[in-house]
Every structure is written in structure tokens, then in C-alpha cells.
Image (cartoon, rainbow, N blue to C red):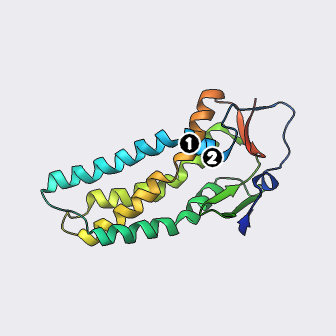
Amino acid sequence: MIKFVKSIDNISKYQCGKLPKNAKKLKAPASMAEMMKKSMPVAVILCVVMILAMFTKMYLSHTRVVSKPAIIGGLLLGFSLLIVHEWLHAIVYPKEAQVTIGKLKGKMVFVALVSYPLNRARFILMCLLPFLLGVIPLTLFLLASPHATVFNGLVFGMACVGMVSPYPDVYNVILVMRQSSRNDKIMFYGDDLYKIS
């Protein structure tokens, strides 16, 4: 079940399901700020991918392929889809899981909060599914005519947000891959991530 709330000031309040006795906390950054800092190399790599996509298309086309104002419009469209990003996380959970989507109080950050065990493969899918919001517009950008500069700018801006915004989710996947086995279940509880063997 997916529930939308306007403002979230306490993540732990929404991630307080039943934690099994055999659950083991994964080693992870102690705060969201520290986690964002540690996951920054992932964001840098994703930014490099976007820059390479732009320069490759320009090099092959021998022309400017985007309208700068359209890129700004695309970025704004991409930011408006961040709520969809969280919804894509939420739809991976079964119906009996209570998923709360909302904006963190005082920040322009949306989150999907849930405390429910998923098998490792499904947890990874849950983390990475929002990449659709980057992969689809990036594919459209790469396939579109280089002379469709407004369209290219819009979809490139959307792709930038869609490709880079999941960087903390990629970091969670890295943590899970390093610290759990294929048959483990993974769940959030409070501010932490747990494996259940």
C-alpha cells in the first residue's frame, strides 16, 4: 500500500516494521549527510556518462545538438518527476507493505520509506528501477535527429536528473552486494539497512 504525505520530519517513524531476531545491521554511513558524501563518486561517474553522451553526439553530428534554454526546461521537468522516482521504488514492494512517499521537511528531497524485507534481487530492482527516468530520455536523446535541438535539450535535461538522482540508491546496492549473499533478505529499519539470512 502506497501512502503520500506532504512532509516527513522523522524517517524512523515510517521505517519501523518487525525486525527479525536474526537480522544483522549492514555497515553503512551513520547519517544521511554522510551517506550522500560517501556516495558522491557514484554521482560523479553518472555525470561523466552524461557528458560523454553529449560530446559523442556533438562529435558525430559536427553541430550543436541542443538548445540551452530547452536543457533548463528539461532539468525542471526532470525535477518535477522526482516524485515518480520515489513511486518507482514503491511499486516493487508487495501490497501488504506500507510505503510512505513524501518530502523531507526543510529540504527539496523526496523519499519513499518502508520497513519490509525483500529478497536481495528484488531489493536491487527496487533501488535501480528509477533509472528508467534517465535511461528512456537518454535513449531518445541519442536516437533523435541532431537538428531537433529543442527536443534534444528537453530530453537531455530530463536524462541528467533521471540518471544522476539515483546515486544514493546505487550506493545502497553496492553496500548490499558487498555485505550480503544471494539468499539474504534486505530491509530498512529506522535509519539503517539490515540483512536477514
Q: Position of residue 22 (x, y in %)?
A: 83, 30
User: Which residue is disc 2 drawn over?
Assistant: 33
Spatial separation of the CA atoms under disc 1 and disc 2 = 6 Å
Q: Residue at x 54, y 42 (%)?
A: 170
In this picture, is 119 found above or below 94? above
Q: Are marks 1 and 2 in contact (CB under 8 Å)?
A: yes
Q: Residue furthest left?
A: 62
User: Which residue is disc 1 drawn over?
Assistant: 37
Q: Tell me if residue 80 can be seen.
A: yes
Q: Residue at x 72, y 36 (%)?
A: 185
Three-letter residue code for mark 1: Lys
Relative horizontal placement of residue 68, taking residue 99 as reference (left or right): left
* Quadrant of the frame with the C terminus: top right
Task: Answer with the quarter of the image where residue 187 lies.
Answer: top right
Task: Answer with the quarter of the image where residue 180 lies.
Answer: top right
Relative horizontal placement of residue 82, taking residue 19 as reference (left or right): left
Q: Residue at x 21, y 64 (%)?
A: 145
Q: Residue at x 59, y 31 (%)?
A: 177
Q: Position of residue 26 (x, y in %)?
A: 70, 32
* Quadrant of the frame with the N terminus: bottom right
Find numbered disc 1 in the image and state the secondary structure of the residue it sits on: helix
Relative horizontal placement of residue 58, taking residue 195 as reference (left or right): left
In this picture, is 181 found above or below 47? above
Say few, some or many: other residues with alpha carbon within 10 Å of mark 2 (under 14 / 14 to 19 / 20 or more). few
